[in-house]
Image: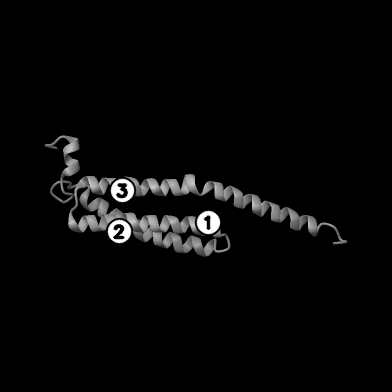
Amino acid sequence: MQLWPWEYLFESWDQTNFPDLYNTIFVASIVMLIVSVVFYNVRTRQLHRHAIYVQMYEWMLWTCVITFSLIIVYWIFRFDWIIVLSTLVIGLGVLVWIRFVRFPPYFAAYERQLAKSRYYSRQRFAHPET
């Protein structure tokens, strides 16, 4: 380390400036891109009747595709480290926001809707006269 930490932000992201992160982030991006596509396909087939869950996984898929594809483009064209770092932080932050902030209220409303429908169907078929 020959520069101050903030001076590395404006260095190009290549093998000479970041030897320990350069290939590691590239391989992790490819792996995460493949994992997110496979995870999306598996989960949407399992939950095809529950539209709100499919929507969440679609949001997560496109966030992963955009973020990790950009990292691959940055690896090819050697962008500055600040751009790579900001893309990773924003992309992973959006993933956390999707899963833990945006969709939980929708999940709660959907669970209430399912509970009501189960209750009414149980009430309807509970008595032999109906």
Question: x, y percentage for residue 66?
Answer: 34, 57
Q: Are marks 3 and 2 in contact (CB under 8 Å)?
A: no
Residue 123 relative to residue 66: left or right: right
Question: Which numbered marker is on residue 69?
Answer: 2
Q: Earlier in the sequence, mark 3 or mark 2?
A: 2
Question: x, y percentage for residue 90?
Answer: 34, 46
SS under mark 2: helix
Q: Residue at x 16, y 48 (%)?
A: 12
Residue named by callout 3: 88
Q: Residues within 10 Å of mark 3 (few under 14, many from 20)?
A: some
Question: x, y percentage for residue 57?
Answer: 47, 57
Question: x, y percentage for residue 58?
Answer: 45, 59
Q: Residue at x 50, y 62 (%)?
A: 44
Q: Earlier in the sequence, mark 3 or mark 1?
A: 1
Q: Residues within 10 Å of mark 2 (few under 14, many from 20)?
A: some
Q: Amino acid at mark 3?
A: Leu
SS under mark 3: helix
Q: Residue at x 18, y 46 (%)?
A: 18
Foreground of the two, 42 or 3 = 3
Q: Give the Cα separation between the discs numbered 3 and 2.
A: 11 Å
Q: Give the Cα separation between the discs numbered 3 and 1.
A: 25 Å
